[in-house]
Image (cartoon, helix red, strand yellow):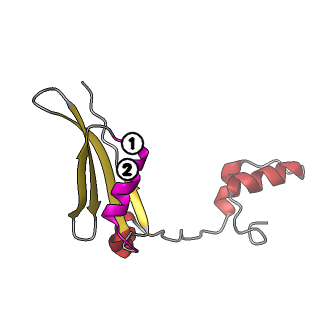
Amino acid sequence: MSLANPLWGALRIHGELLKLGIEVSQATVGRYLPWRPKVASPTWRSFLHNYLTDIAAIDMFVVATATFQLLYALIVLGHDRRRIIHFDVTPNPTQAWLSSQMTEAFPWDTAPGYAAQQRFLTHD
């Protein structure tokens, strides 16, 4: 049964055997299954290495001034050279302002393929 269905594990084969009326424990089924090495999946490090030039991080945070006024800062970081691509501050962020910041940060066709959003939460 395991040769005909290589993706089935001991739990699934045990359930199928119970449906056929064969009472055997799941541990016994697992003991007789052929050992298959797991295919190694790509690591996070290899993903970053392959797509480093195509990744940008965007963060927006609040800054309190000396006069207790709240300003909203936006920063766009490029991961390939760990550099600041774009930075701007506004007292009143709107959707139109945010979209214009993305246009200014990535003019024409310079936008990366992937954007990773990081969010930092602060507690008072």
**Residue 111 locus on image (x, y percent):** 38, 69
**Residue 122 locus on image (x, y percent):** 27, 33
Q: In this view, does 114 lie above or below 23?
A: below
The C terminus - image quarter: top left
Q: Is residue 42 above or below residue 20?
A: below
Disc 1 marks which residue?
Answer: 94
**Residue 108 locus on image (x, y percent):** 39, 73
Q: In this view, does 41 lie above or below 120?
A: below
Residue nearest the observer in this picture, 69 or 81: 69
- Kindly give the residue lying farthest to the right in the view shown: 20
Disc 2 marks which residue?
Answer: 98
Identify the disc placed on residue 35: none
Secondary structure beneath dot 2 equals helix
Which residue is rendered at x = 37% and y = 58% of the image?
Answer: 102
Q: Magenta stretch containing residue 83, yes or no?
A: no
Instruction: Specify the segment rendered in magenta.
Output: 93-108
Which residue is rendered at x = 33% and y = 56% of the image?
Answer: 101
Q: Is residue 4 above or below residue 28?
A: below
Q: As shown in the figure, which amino acid type bears the numbered disc 1? A: Thr
**Residue 78 locus on image (x, y percent):** 28, 65
Residue nearest the observer in this picture, 72 or 36: 72
Q: Quadrant of residue 103?
A: bottom left
The N terminus - image quarter: bottom right
Q: Magenta stretch containing residue 106, yes or no?
A: yes
Secondary structure beneath dot 1 equals loop
- Tell me the CA gap for discs 2 and 1: 6 Å
Q: As shown in the figure, which amino acid type bears the numbered disc 2? A: Leu
Which residue is rendered at x = 31% and y = 36% of the image?
Answer: 121
- Is the magenta region chiefly helix, strand or loop? helix
Labels 2 and 1 touching (C-beta < 8 A): yes
Residue nearest the observer in this picture, 101 or 74: 101
